[in-house]
Amino acid sequence: MAYITRRGPVYYLNLRLPEHLFPRCHTLRLSLNIRHRQSALFLAASLAQQVHDHLNEHPLADVQTLRKLCSEWRDSAPSPTIQPAPRTAQAVTVKRHVQGPTLASLSKLYIEEGKRGGTWREVSTFEVERALRDLFELMGDMPVEAFDSQQARLLKERLSRCPQYFGLRPEYEGKTLMQVVESGATYKTITAVTVNNRLRKLSAFLNWCKSNGYITDNPLVGLKAMTGSAKEARLSFDRHDLTTLLNLDSLKAEARKHPWRYWLPLLGRATGARLEELCQLRVDDVIEQQGIQCIRIDDTREGQNLKNSSSRRILPLHPALIDLGLVLHAETVRNTGADRLFPELEAVRGKLGHAPSKWFGRYKTKQGITDSRKTFHSFRHTLIDDLRDAGVQDSLIKRIAGHEDGAVTFSIYGSRSPLKAMAEALQRIEL
């Protein structure tokens, strides 16, 4: 998150860097050479976005390099033009209005309170800060009371025109997000689902502003981009896809450097678990219960996070996974002293699944599967579809998938957990 401070007549950038990348010095300070607060906020937001983009491509960059780049970006930025306020009879009212707290000042309090209270996981903090960066990049800073329904609609419209992979694609290098959005160029935009995720994060911020008495209404309540159905957003794999993706020779070739490349697709197909749930498995999450080999999906240890409480579950292992040596793999990793089943994975912005997600996208394309709606998450859709086709009860499917089901009232870890029924259901799936 970028903030500005004032030293004498000049504003300075105070940019907080990711602590996992900069454990010793995680604040970048730089003079903006600007005396006007509004212009300083615009420039600070632009520099923060460019630093974020650079770190996505060069995570090993040091602070001195970033400071030098920021100086270059600052000096090459167009000079701000500040329009003087019109001298009208309403000038007194407007002046009184802009003296209230701004979105930027309140966002700082919001982030600090969220971190101090342990409200967000690391990944959630990153997503909140990214949504706020988009807000300031696309709308600038303003008094919180000035952000009305008209501003909210404009924000949604500009978010809907944001490009995919803005921080990664070379054609956007050196450009601000607002410059790209206003360019009129043709490019692939972020999905409506992503737009709505950003709007939800920003709506939560405005709800906090309302709860703390800074505004009386939240103009983002109920505002969202229209989306298609979940089926349209993510497609299941067909038989040919599965045969191609789960070819053992292909997976072994991919796994020469990283064993997780072999196991994660197989686990995704056989369990329907989310990618992050699989990546954060510990060696002692491969367990035996009621005489059945299982994996435990939990969030009780450091670095484990789940989507919701219903995601906490125990899943029987498909016999094919046992035959392929998954239990033996867990024991081998345990003997090395490692805690996690896939110790090579490193968290990026709090997510262990970052590298596997990128790899799987390249892998499926190499195998000839180019539909962008087919992702690792498609294994989950495919398993659910197959279980339904096999006549498995919907409540049992929800239990396997970790979905909420009001009809199920007994504890998933209790003695009545239907492990045998789940095992029989999963054995109907061809691996």
Image (tube, rainbow, N blue to C red):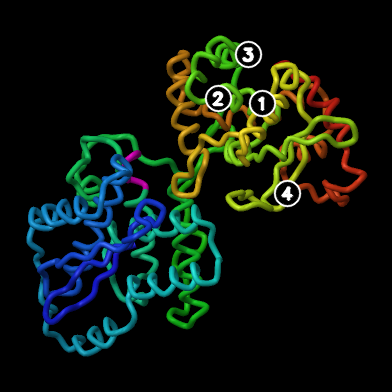
Asked whether, in this view, residue 408 is left or right of residue 404, the answer is: right
Q: Are marks 1 and 3 in contact (CB under 8 Å)?
A: no
As shown in the figure, which amino acid type bears the numbered disc 1? His
- Image quadrant in which you'd find residue 332: top right
- Of label 4 and label 1, which has the lower sequence position? 4
Decide whether residue 213 is among the magenta residues: no
Q: Please tell me how crowded label 4 is: few (under 14), some (14-19), or many (20+) other residues with Cα within 10 Å.
A: some
Locate residue 119: give its quadrant: bottom right
| Residue at mark 4 | 310
Q: Point out the frontmost of discs 4 and 1.
A: 1
Residue 386 drawn at (x, y percent)? 72, 23
- SS state under label 2: loop
Q: Which residue is labeled 2 in the image?
A: 259
Residue position marked by numbered label 3 in the rendering: 239
Q: Residues within 10 Å of mark 3 (few under 14, many from 20)?
A: few
Disc 4 on helix, strand or loop? helix
34 and 346: which is toward the camera: 346
Q: Secondary structure at mark 3?
A: helix
What's the CA distance linking mark 3 and mark 4? 29 Å
Viewer-nearest of labels 2 and 4? 2
